[in-house]
Amino acid sequence: MANTKMISGYLAVAGALLVLSSGAQAVTVDWGVHDTSESQRLYSSLFSSSPYNSTFTFSLQSLSDLLASFTTGLTGSGSVGLFSADNTQIGSFSFGGTYSTSSLTFSSLGAGDYYYTISGAGYSPIIGANFSSTLTPVSAVPKPGSLAMLLAGLGMVGLLARRRTA
């Protein structure tokens, strides 16, 4: 009877370890409208450097720059990609190393829906890794042609005003 309980205990521990260390990890997070700063802590399976593939969906409401950063814990390597809603890749960067941070700025993204994908293997199950995305709104800058037309229009108004006074 005691041996049966001991064997059952060993099987329970072995099963728990198997579950904790198995398979690829996948996380899908919907951030909704991107706030000024978004972040997500990622953990891998215990006793495993299993692959992971995470997706973070969000939308932008105006012209913006995004700074995407990935910080590894003890170990880890992989890549971060930014895609538009129609699956067009906008850009990507790789990360790897011990306690290292990799980042890339995606400039002048228009209003619309986007998503990040993060894939790789081997970050720490206890310390984990951190992914963050920082939003900076971009004010629209007039094109040189628009500025030239504005100046020409002001010049015409000035000439008309001068002719009226003369």
Image (spheres, rainbow, N blue to C red):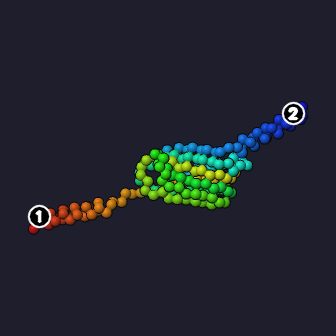
Residue under pointer 1: 164
In the depicted view, which residue is nearer to us: 39 or 118? 118
The residue depicted at 16 percent of the width and 65 percent of the height is: 159
How far across and down, in percent of the image, does residue 23 sit? 68, 43
Q: Is residue 107 visible?
A: yes
Q: Residue furthest front?
A: 88
How far across and down, in percent of the image, does residue 5 sit? 85, 34
In the depicted view, which residue is nearer to us: 71 or 52? 52
How far across and down, in percent of the image, does residue 134 sit? 51, 55
The residue depicted at 86 percent of the width and 37 percent of the height is: 6
Q: Report the side of 127 relative to 93 (left or right).
A: right
Q: Report the side of 71 relative to 107 (left or right).
A: right
Q: Residue furthest left?
A: 166
How far across and down, in percent of the image, does residue 113 sit? 46, 46
Image quarter (top left, top right, bottom left or bottom right) of the N terminus: top right
Q: Earlier in the sequence, mark 1 or mark 2?
A: 2
Amino acid at the residue labelled 1: Arg
Amino acid at the residue labelled 2: Thr
Q: Quadrant of residue 152?
A: bottom left
The residue depicted at 70 percent of the width and 43 percent of the height is: 22
Residue under pointer 2: 4
Q: CA distance from mark 1 to mark 2?
A: 108 Å
**Which element type, helix, strand or loop, lies under badge 2?**
helix
Q: Residue furthest top?
A: 1
